[in-house]
């Protein structure tokens, strides 16, 4: 018991922090900045301790309800970093929330708790609970600007479609439980292996679960909620959704498919490859005509999910490591872009791409950060996304999925096009709006950190890749 | 041989220059320009030194440096040059050094310009020096994005369209080649039992004939786009025309050679694939030479003319490579060098004129050459006159343009003559028909260059051009002098470069000839015949 508790100390700490923020919120001053700093400091400490001690206290906890291994720890770091950056962006954005700013930070932390538990789940119940903890927090967060119709629309859409996927997930789990009599991943795997041939009921259950999780990672054809929710939600929440929620979806999908449903590999590989191709094409092509930068990043995040699915379709160690590595690269790149969007919209109140014209003259730092983020997403060397895409496609080539690799390669060109359209506005366009763009010291630090991350992960990927490889080897 | 890391220093000098500039104030233009000149001078000096230190008897890859970079995937920082890449490194150094001097005339956003320019050239050096397939590709793609901004911000004619087209085209070429690179990587892993991107190790593996034939094609198309090989050339003239002078120089002078260099390295990896596909290249390159030349004749914009002329000349390079003959291959590599210098010179000259005249249009083809007072109602009132009679005001520029034209048309004494001669001699035995046609390409070159000289430099001068300034200061003259001297030195003493190049291409051809012949009926021609039947 004590062992179990020690192993999940970061999760406990996040939970306590969230509660503390909630309890303290009535006592904080109206601006609630103190709560923001408390959350940021707490998250940073938790992240740091996870980095230092997380590797030491590993093993199953609570009768295999939760599995703490280096895979889990890798994702704890990803989520911790994401939440840290999101909290930093929220400080200046929180003025749009009028009241209830305290609960906002608590909700972010609750969502973080759900995310951290997801990759650790060794049991369908943990999976369901942590997924719901994350999703429920996000339903509220996306509707947090309740006076903005778009935000309310986003929350409602997300709630309804999210509820649908929850139902699907539960239905799928019930199939697996009904046949195998267990909710434990390992026992389900054993049952399927012992059975020898594949039971159609198991297949239906697995299919339903895959569909439900595809909703979370926003893969085609379960992506419909993405553009509206991304556009309507408060921007920091959008950033959290696009990085954290997607990474969480992949974390659990990978663990489930690669380790628990390994006996069904032949079947799901085909399905995932099809999803990957469709997602790549849809996300990247639909991003082209977008005029709103949050919508564009929404479609682009669908496209990025396609690349990650390519790694899953390859389903070898290289492919899974590539997914983990790419999520890290995606984190820095996407957060950098969203950070710029938040700072920019705080002054201009606009998310229209055409308003970014001349940004490179107005604020060179913002323009550089945005360009690095976008180019990294497009996969341009020497940035993080380049190496990520390189190994993702490499893993697929190794499995002979050439048709998928061709689609992925062609989509690099397509995505470069729409990312360049934004860079074109920023660098080639004439400056129209002269108002200076203020960047708070904390946000400036976060921007530098993101840029350093993009460059470091891209130029010297070796340590990060080794970490991802060590984490993904555990699944096989 | 010492252990001094020559190649790393050549590679890092411009990069460090760029990084250093980030911390300088934008106002400090002189310091920025000096840093750029200094950094590229270091690279140039070391490249020339390398030429003399290169051991021509030993051949092979020299000045090798190797550091493990990503051990788990077999990626290493592995640099080295053979005779072929040595010539290319030297070319890059000359072009960037003179390009920096040409760019001194740029006044808008100087800091960003030089940072991007130096980043671009770092990528180019990286491609020519990398003996690691990963870094080869890495730098190949790295060269594309700075180009987008360089053309987009500092460019001229139709720049936004041209730069987007160019960037997407080149990226498309890169990702097509990527598929083959990854396939090679996967096969190598199963053959060797461990991951590696080491070109030397990859070159020793025997790939099956079918694999070579299938995967040589993406490499050929991918790199061919950058050459630019017809029918993938359409990005190139517009891109050249829109780019600022130094970028046009680097682009036509060096970047197009990256494509040809990529094809040469692919031939080394896939000898059978090369034997199978190169006859197709021998046909396509005729379109480059003749069609490119024809279009160049019809252009009134000087930069468009030189742009098409470049793609026409790259046709000779492709022809020389396609012949798989040692003399022609040496000639092709030498032409890559000579054409790079020559076209750099041409773009520099046109850029010099354009900076002052803001037009590059020559008078209409046919009928009337030059500005003729008698035939125009009131010509001095013409708002946008074409350039004409410039030699009167710009004797220095005029002289160099004529020299460039002579080099381009293959007059003896210039490096271009030697290389084109070698290509023609070497190719004649393999593709006699193409060779004869290619020789006519030289006539076409002469036509459009003579026309340009007559139209732009001779005839009456329009009053508007009376106030143009010639290149008078030494910083203005230096780049032209350097480039023309290189052309002449190599023209009179070609073995300076041909000898090292020979060590590289001889090794390549030995491998291709040593590879088992294609099985019966497996050549492209045979296959095409069987389809027609």
Image (spheres, coloured by chain):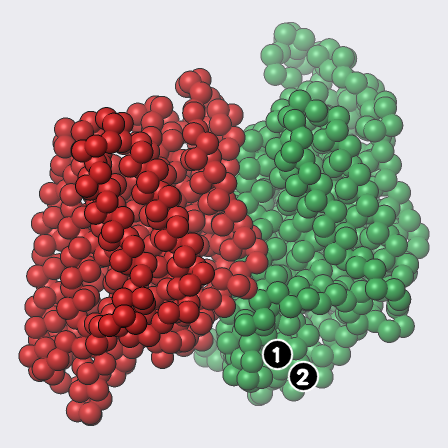
Chain colours: A red, B green
Report the quarter where the C terminus of chain A lies.
Answer: bottom left
> Taking A93 as reference, is B385 above or below it?
above
Q: Which residue is mark 2?
A: B515
Quarter occupied by residue A141: top left
For marks 1 and 2, the one nearer the N-term is 1
> Taking B172 as reference, is B341 above or below it?
above
Q: Secondary structure at mark 1?
A: helix
Q: Chain of mark 1?
A: B
x and y percent of residue B291 in the render? 61, 49
x and y percent of residue A117 in the render? 26, 62
Residue density around tag 2, few if under 14, some if 14–19, many if 20 or more, within 10 Å: some
From the viewer's perspective, is B329 left or right of B376? Answer: right
x and y percent of residue A159 in the render? 12, 48
x and y percent of residue A16 in the render? 25, 51
Residue density around tag 1, few if under 14, some if 14–19, many if 20 or more, within 10 Å: many
Which residue is painted at 50% across and 37% down in the image?
A: A368
Which residue is painted at 64% across and 45% down in the image?
A: B120
Q: Chain of mark 2?
A: B
Q: Secondary structure at mark 2?
A: loop
From the viewer's perspective, is B70 left or right of B403? Answer: left
Mark 1–mark 2 CB contact (< 8 Å): yes
Q: Which residue is mark 1?
A: B272
From the viewer's perspective, is B128 left or right of B228? Answer: right
Which residue is painted at 24% across and 31% down in the image?
A: A28
- Can residue B376 be seen here? The reply is yes
- Can residue B164 be seen here? The reply is no
From the viewer's perspective, is B23 left or right of B505? Answer: left
**B52 and A227: which one is in front?**
A227
Quarter occupied by residue A172: bottom left
> Taking B516 as reference, is B500 above or below it?
above
């Amino acid at each position: 018991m004590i062992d179990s508790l020690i192993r999940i100390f970061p999760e406990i700490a996040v939970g306590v922090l969230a509660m503390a923020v909630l309890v303290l919120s009535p006592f904080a001053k109206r601006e609630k900045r103190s709560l923001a700093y408390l959350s940021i400091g707490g998250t940073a400490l938790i992240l740091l301790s996870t980095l230092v001690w997380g590797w030491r206290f590993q093993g199953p906890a609570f009768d295999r309800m939760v599995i703490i291994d280096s895979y889990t720890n890798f994702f704890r770091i990803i989520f911790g970093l994401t939440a840290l950056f999101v909290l930093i962006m929220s400080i200046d954005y929180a003025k749009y929330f009028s009241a209830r700013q305290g609960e906002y930070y608590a909700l972010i932390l609750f969502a973080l708790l759900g995310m951290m538990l997801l990759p650790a789940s060794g049991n369908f119940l943990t999976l369901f609970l942590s997924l719901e903890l994350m999703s429920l927090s996000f339903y509220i967060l996306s509707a947090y600007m309740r006076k903005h119709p778009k935000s309310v629309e986003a929350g409602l859409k997300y709630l309804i479609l999210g509820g649908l996927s929850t139902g699907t997930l539960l239905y799928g789990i019930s199939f697996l439980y009904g046949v195998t009599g267990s909710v434990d991943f390992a026992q389900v795997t054993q049952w399927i292996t012992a059975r020898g041939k594949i039971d159609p009921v198991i297949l239906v259950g697995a299919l339903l679960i895959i569909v439900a999780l595809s909703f979370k990672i926003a893969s085609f054809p379960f992506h419909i909620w993405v553009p509206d929710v991304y556009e309507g939600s408060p921007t920091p929440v959008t950033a959290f959704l696009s990085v954290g929620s997607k990474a969480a979806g992949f974390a659990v999908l990978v663990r489930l498919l690669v380790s628990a449903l390994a006996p069904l590999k032949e079947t799901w590989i085909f399905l995932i490859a099809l999803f990957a191709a469709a997602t790549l094409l849809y996300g990247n092509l639909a991003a082209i005509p977008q005029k709103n930068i949050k919508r564009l990043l929404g479609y682009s995040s669908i496209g990025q999910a396609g690349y990650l699915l390519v790694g899953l379709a390859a389903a070898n160690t290289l492919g899974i490591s590539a997914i983990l590595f790419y999520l890290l690269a995606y984190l820095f790149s996407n957060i950098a872009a969203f950070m710029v969007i938040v700072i920019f919209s705080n002054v201009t109140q606009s998310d229209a791409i055409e308003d970014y014209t001349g940004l490179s003259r107005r604020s060179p730092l913002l323009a550089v950060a945005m360009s690095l983020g976008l180019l990294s997403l497009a996969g341009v060397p020497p940035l993080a996304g380049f190496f990520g895409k390189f190994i993702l496609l490499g893993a697929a080539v190794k499995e002979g999925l050439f048709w998928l690799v061709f689609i992925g390669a062609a989509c690099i060109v397509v995505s470069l096009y729409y990312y360049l359209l934004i860079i074109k506005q920023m660098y080639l366009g004439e400056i129209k709006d002269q108002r200076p763009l203020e960047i708070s010291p904390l946000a400036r630090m976060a921007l530098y950190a993101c840029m350093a991350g993009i460059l470091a992960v891209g130029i010297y990927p070796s340590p990060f890749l080794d970490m991802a490889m060590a984490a993904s080897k555990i699944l096989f | 041989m010492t252990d001094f890391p020559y190649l790393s220093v050549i590679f890092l000098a411009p990069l460090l220059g760029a990084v250093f500039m980030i911390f300088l104030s934008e106002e400090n233009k002189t310091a920025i320009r000096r840093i750029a000149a200094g950094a590229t001078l270091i690279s140039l000096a070391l490249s020339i030194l390398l030429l003399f230190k290169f051991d021509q008897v030993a051949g092979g890859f020299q000045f090798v440096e190797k550091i493990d970079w990503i051990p788990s995937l077999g990626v290493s920082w592995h640099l080295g040059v053979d005779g072929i890449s040595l010539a290319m490194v030297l070319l890059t150094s000359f072009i960037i050094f003179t390009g920096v001097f040409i760019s001194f005339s740029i006044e808008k956003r100087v800091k960003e310009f030089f940072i991007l320019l130096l980043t671009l050239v770092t990528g180019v050096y990286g491609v020519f020096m990398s003996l690691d397939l990963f870094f080869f590709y890495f730098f190949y793609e790295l060269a594309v994005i700075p180009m987008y901004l360089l053309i987009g911000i500092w460019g001229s004619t139709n720049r936004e369209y041209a730069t987007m087209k160019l960037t997407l085209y080149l990226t498309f070429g890169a990702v097509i080649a990527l598929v083959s690179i990854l396939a090679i990587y996967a096969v190598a892993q199963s053959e060797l039992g461990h991951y590696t991107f080491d070109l030397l190790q990859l070159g020793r593996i025997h790939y099956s004939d079918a694999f070579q034939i299938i995967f040589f094609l993406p490499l050929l198309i991918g790199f061919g786009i950058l050459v630019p090989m017809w029918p993938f050339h359409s990005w190139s003239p517009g891109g050249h025309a829109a780019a600022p002078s130094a970028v046009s120089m680097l682009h036509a002078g060096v970047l197009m050679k990256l494509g040809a260099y990529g094809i040469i390295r692919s031939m080394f990896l896939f000898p059978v694939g090369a034997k199978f596909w190169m006859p197709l290249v021998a046909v396509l390159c005729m379109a480059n030479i003749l069609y490119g030349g024809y279009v160049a004749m019809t252009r009134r914009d000087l930069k468009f003319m030189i742009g098409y002329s470049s793609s026409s000349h790259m046709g000779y390079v492709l022809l020389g490579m396609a012949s798989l003959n040692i003399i022609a291959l040496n000639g092709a590599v030498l032409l890559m060098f000579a054409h790079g210098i020559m076209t750099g010179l041409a773009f520099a000259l046109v850029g010099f004129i354009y900076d002052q005249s803001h037009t590059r249009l020559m008078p209409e083809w046919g009928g009337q050459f030059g500005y003729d007072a008698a035939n125009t109602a009131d010509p001095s009132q013409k708002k946008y006159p074409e350039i004409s009679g410039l030699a009167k005001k710009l004797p220095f520029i005029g002289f160099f343009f004529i020299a460039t034209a002579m080099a381009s048309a293959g007059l003896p004494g210039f490096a271009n003559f030697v290389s084109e001669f070698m290509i023609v001699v070497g190719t004649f035995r393999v593709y006699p028909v193409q060779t004869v046609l290619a020789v006519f390409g030289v006539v076409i070159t002469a036509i459009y260059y003579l026309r340009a000289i007559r139209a732009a430099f001779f005839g009456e001068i329009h009053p508007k051009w009376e106030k143009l300034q010639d290149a008078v200061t030494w910083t203005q003259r230096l780049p032209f002098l350097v480039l023309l001297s290189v052309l002449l030195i190599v023209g009179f003493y070609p073995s300076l470069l041909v000898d090292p190049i020979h060590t590289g291409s001889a090794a390549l051809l030995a491998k291709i000839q040593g590879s088992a012949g294609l099985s019966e009926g497996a050549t492209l021609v045979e296959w095409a015949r069987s389809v027609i039947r």
